[in-house]
Image (cartoon, coloured by chain):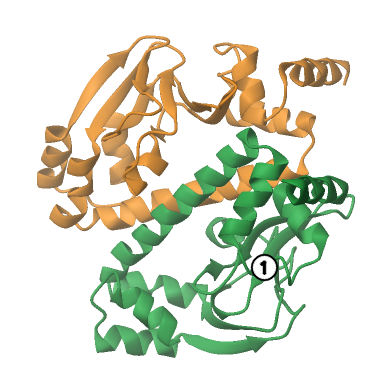
Chain colours: A green, B orange
Amino acid sequence: MQTLIQKIRNSIILTSEAEEYIYSISKEKKVSKGEILIRQGQMVNKTFFVTQGSLRSFCVDKEGKEHTLQFAVTDWWISDFIAIYNHEPASLTVQSITDSVVIEFNFQKLAQIYLKFPEFELFQRKNLERHVVSLHKRILNQLQLSALERYNLFLEQYPNIEQHVPNYHIASYLGITQQSLSRVRAEKAKM
Amino acid sequence: MQTLIQKIRNSIILTSEAEEYIYSISKEKKVSKGEILIRQGQMVNKTFFVTQGSLRSFCVDKEGKEHTLQFAVTDWWISDFIAIYNHEPASLTVQSITDSVVIEFNFQKLAQIYLKFPEFELFQRKNLERHVVSLHKRILNQLQLSALERYNLFLEQYPNIEQHVPNYHIASYLGITQQSLSRVRAEKAKM
């Protein structure tokens, strides 16, 4: 929890009342490798801040194929934001990749923080701005980079994930088949 | 300009001081078809709200191939947000697709609005939340849908754009070749 409190203090002045409120609406939760926190098709009212380990959000298409939207490591938020903001059932599953520790928030209570402590608007705007930038980059990279270039960026962005996840998670994040991922790795090994 | 003022009023109470400030930091601008508002490689300090017509943001890769990040129609914002938030040169070009009318804002002055009129934090948070949802959907669609399904969604989302833009703009947004786009259209015509 101290990681999150520090992260908030880095961008706004956190009063003791606001800190108390954050503690009152959250709980630290240990999750085991493979545990599911949000399940595709169900209603969502939780969002998670990762303090240890790593998680993944993905959807399963009509043919049963998985597609990874996001990996979340220490200091990242993860949930199904489409479901939360649009008030619709989850189109994503959120699963722990390793034994992890997360701070779980009830989303409705978290949303009240802006009314009670308006300084959190600034904190959240900055978070969302950074998130928009990373999503724009992801889309541009997907459109213009080769599979090898995307794989290299993935290794840079998530240096500790590869050892924990099966190949099809990485392939499904890069938008390529497992066969292509093997080719890309062979290509990289030769360089 | 009235479109934007109304859009703001739909989500927050707009004081006459704040309205005056918005007028003071913006100007309405007619742009001709093909005109470039932001050029890849240059510094960016402007953001645009579209009141008429349509624009496009795209990047050109090492091989000279264009990749379309976004189309913007009436009521949408467009700029190079990666450049603005990261204080780096534009990785995108923003170009008018049709004769259009935009409201041009100096980004630094626009950013001061949160200090002068903190109620705009809520307005912007809601905008950013909606934008994040649409980007998550775009990434998931890119990963899991067929080219035909993506093309159908494009026609739904931008019903009036197709008549104005050459095929390679649409193909470069969908992440497919022009040949694939022709195949997709033929497939659709047969349905």
Residue at 19% across / 49% down in the picture? B113
Which of the 4 image quarters holds residue B61? top right
Residue at 23% across / 76% down in the picture? A13
Is A134 in front, or is A25?
Answer: A134
Is B136 in front, or is A186?
Answer: A186
Task: Estimate the x, y position of residue A90 in percent, counting from the top left.
Answer: 68, 62
Which of the 4 image quarters holds residue A82? bottom right
A180 left or right of A112 in image: right
Q: Chain of mark 1?
A: A
Task: Estimate the x, y position of residue B3 in percent, counting from the top left.
Answer: 31, 31
Around disc 1, counting alpha carbons within 10 Å, would you say few (fewer than 14), some (14 to 19), or many (20 or more)? many
Q: Secondary structure at mark 1?
A: loop
Which of the 4 image quarters holds residue A30? bottom right
Residue at 76% across / 33% down in the picture? B149
Is B173 in front, or is B87?
Answer: B87
Task: Estimate the x, y position of residue B169 in percent, counting from the top left.
Answer: 59, 19
Furthest-front residue in this view: A191
Q: Is residue B173 visible?
A: yes
**B61 versus A98 height, above or below:** above
For the N terminus of chain A, the quadrant is bottom left
Figure label count: 1
**B24 versus A96 height, above or below:** above
Q: Is residue B141 visible?
A: no
A121 left or right of A39 in image: left
Task: Estimate the x, y position of residue A183 in percent, counting from the top left.
Answer: 83, 45
A108 left or right of B101 in image: right
Disc 1 marks which amino acid?
Ile
Residue at 85% across / 20% down in the picture? B187
Mark 1 lies on residue: A161
